[in-house]
Amino acid sequence: MTEPPVDRPPVRPEHAAFADQVEAAQDVLDAFMAAWNARDASGVRASFNFPHVRFASGRVNILAPEQVTDAMYAGAALSEWGRSAWLRREVIHAGPDKVQFDTRFARFRPDGSLISSFDSIYIVTLQDGRWGVQGRSSYAP
């Protein structure tokens, strides 16, 4: 069973004062997913702000740019993986330099069948004039 990806949600009224920031953060999430699916480590790195923090599998990993490499795709969790897609991206909080998202993403096999989907929180920050994903907390392995 495949789950259809979601379109970019509209900015809700409570976040309207930061609509430009939400749009910029959404652009980064789109860039991250495109780079991830292309297995483009340099593109993933370009979509991040550093230090980048990931909470997953009972661990906290703090990544520096040089740790975002093609080796990310070698793990057992991605052995059947063909692509990923956002199923939900809702703004939790938005401000002038940070947007936090409640997300759900899915992993699909190359034939389009669903492997699994995971709830997560993504934190996109503005650093030195550029937006990037700086933190992720998910239930994905």
Image: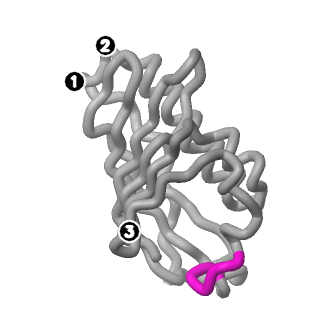
Looking at the rendered structure, the kind of residue marked 1 is Glu
Looking at the rendered structure, the kind of residue marked 3 is Arg
- Of tags 3 and 2, which is closer to the observer? 3
Residue 48, given in percent of the width and then of the height, sits at 59, 41
How has the structure been colored for display?
one colour
Q: Is residue 133 left or right of residue 109?
A: left
- Of tags 1 and 3, which is closer to the observer? 3
Residue position for label 2: 17
Q: Residue at x 63, y 80 (%)?
A: 75
Residue position for label 1: 14
- Residues at marks 1 and 3 touching, judged by CB atoms closer than 8 Å: no
Cα separation, mark 1 vs mark 3, equals 33 Å
Above or below, 73 relative to 122: below
Residue 32, given in percent of the width and then of the height, sits at 62, 47
Instruction: Give the magenta part as a residue range.
Output: 74-78
Above or below, 31 relative to 109: above
Crowding at dot 2, Cα within 10 Å, few <14 / some 14-19 / many 20+, comes out as some
Q: Secondary structure at mark 2?
A: helix
Q: Residue at x 39, y 74 (%)?
A: 57
Q: Quadrant of residue 107?
A: bottom right
Looking at the rendered structure, the kind of residue marked 2 is Ala
Residue position for label 3: 59
